[in-house]
Image (cartoon, rainbow, N blue to C red):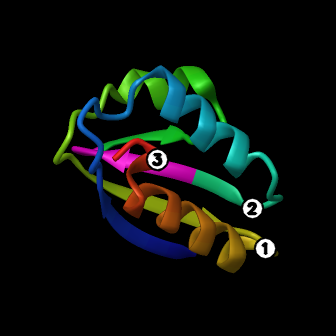
């Protein structure tokens, strides 16, 4: 399992548009992908799950990936979070 901590950097937080983009990106990979926030873990390939986090700017999230293409999925997803979902 690959584990990375990221910080939500964009001003509006993990709202609808970036949540949908995270799910779309994650769905391109076979790897299982979960996000943990304050002890709550959700399936990051579920738009409802990702939106339920309602993570504001500055929130620390733990990304957990496992599966055959988890390395590449982790690289792309961590980069997407670090770029503030393209909203900065």
Magenta-drawn stretch, dominant element (helix, strand or loop): strand
How crowded pointer 2 is (Cα within 10 Å; few <14, some 14-19, many 20+) is rated as many
In the rendered image, residue 2 lying in the magenta stretch gets the answer no
Magenta range:
34-39
Tell which circle, 3 or 2, labels the residue nearer the N-terminal end.
2
Residue position marked by numbered label 1 in the rendering: 69
Q: Is mark 3 on a helix, strand or loop?
A: helix
Tell which circle, 3 or 1, labels the residue nearer the N-terminal end.
1
63 horizontally vs 66: left or right: left
Hey, which quadrant is residue 7 in on the image? Answer: bottom left
* C-alpha distance separating marks 2 and 1: 6 Å
Q: What element carries label 2?
A: loop
Mark 3 or 2, which is nearer the eye? 3
* C-alpha distance separating marks 3 and 1: 21 Å
Query: Where is 42 relative to 62, above or below?
Result: above
Q: Residue at x 56, y 61 (%)?
A: 77
Q: Are marks 2 and 1 in contact (CB under 8 Å)?
A: yes
* C-alpha distance separating marks 3 and 2: 20 Å
Q: Which residue is drawn at 41% across and 71% down?
A: 4
Furthest residue to the front? 88
The percent position of residue 33, horizontal first and vertical second, equals: 61, 54
Query: Where is 26 relative to 64, above or below?
Result: above
The percent position of residue 52, horizontal first and vertical second, equals: 41, 22
Residue position marked by numbered label 3 in the rendering: 85
Q: Which residue is drawn at 45% across and 72% down?
A: 3
Hey, which quadrant is residue 29 in on the image? Answer: bottom right
């Amino acid at each position: 399992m690959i584990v990375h901590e990221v910080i939500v950097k964009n001003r509006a937080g993990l709202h609808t548009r970036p949540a949908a983009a995270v799910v779309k990106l994650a769905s391109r990979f076979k790897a299982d992908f979960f996000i943990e926030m304050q002890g709550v873990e959700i399936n990051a390939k579920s738009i409802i799950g990702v939106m339920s986090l309602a993570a504001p700017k500055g929130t620390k999230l733990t990304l957990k990936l496992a599966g055959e293409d988890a390395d590449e999925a982790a690289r792309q997803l961590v980069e997407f979070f670090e770029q503030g979902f393209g909203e900065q």
